[in-house]
Image: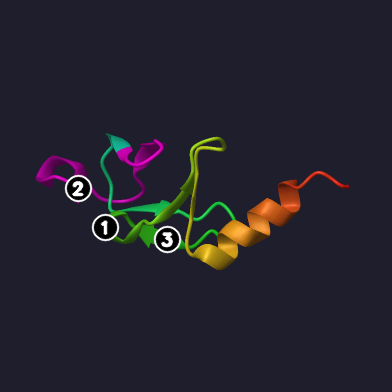
Amino acid sequence: MLGRFERGGSGEAVVEYGDSNLRVVRPGRFVRCAVTGAEIPLDSLRYWSVERQEAYADPDAVMVRLRETAKPA
C-alpha cells in the first residue's frame, strides 16, 4: 500500500522497482506499461521487472516481454 505522500501528484510517477516493493521517486497517479503503454494506477500495480526497471499492466504483458527478450536455443 502506498502512503499518502506517494499517492500525491498528478500525471506519471517515476518509480524504482525492488524485489518485493517499489519506491516512488516522483509522485504521480500512474506508471506506464512497458509493453502496451497503458496507464497503470499506482494502487493497482502488481507486475514489474527489477532487472529491467519497468512495469507491466498484467501477466500477458509480462509474457510478451519475456518472449521478446528470451535467448534463442
Residue bearing mark 3: 39
Locate residue 43 relative to residue 51 in the image: left or right: left
Task: Tell me the SS state at disc 1.
Answer: helix
Question: In the orientation shown, which residue stands out farthest toward the right?
Answer: 73
- Determine whether label 1 and label 3 are within 8 Å by CB: no
Residue at the image point whose x is 36% and y is 48% from the top: 12
Task: Tell me the SS state at disc 3.
Answer: strand
Does the magenta segment cover residue 17?
A: yes
Residue at the image point whose x is 50% and y is 38% from the top: 53
Residue bearing mark 1: 43
Residue 73's x, y, as percent? 88, 47
| Structural crowding at the residue carrying mark 3, measured as other residues with C-alpha within 10 Å and reported as few (<14), some (14–19) or many (≥20) | some
Separation (CA) of disc 1 from disc 3: 12 Å
Q: Nearer the viewer, mark 1 or mark 3?
A: 1
| Structural crowding at the residue carrying mark 2, measured as other residues with C-alpha within 10 Å and reported as few (<14), some (14–19) or many (≥20) | few
Ranked by sequence position, the earlier of labels 2 and 3 is 2
Residue at the image point whose x is 49% and y is 65% from the top: 58
Residue 62's x, y, as percent? 57, 57
Separation (CA) of disc 2 from disc 1: 7 Å
Task: Tell me the SS state at disc 2.
Answer: loop
Separation (CA) of disc 2 from disc 3: 17 Å
Does the magenta segment cover residue 10?
A: yes
- Determine whether label 2 and label 1 are within 8 Å by CB: yes
Residue bearing mark 2: 2
Q: Which residues are magenta?
A: 1-22
Q: Amino acid at mark 2?
A: Leu
Q: Is residue 25 above or below residue 34?
A: above
Q: Which residue is nearer to you in this view: 11 or 25?
A: 25
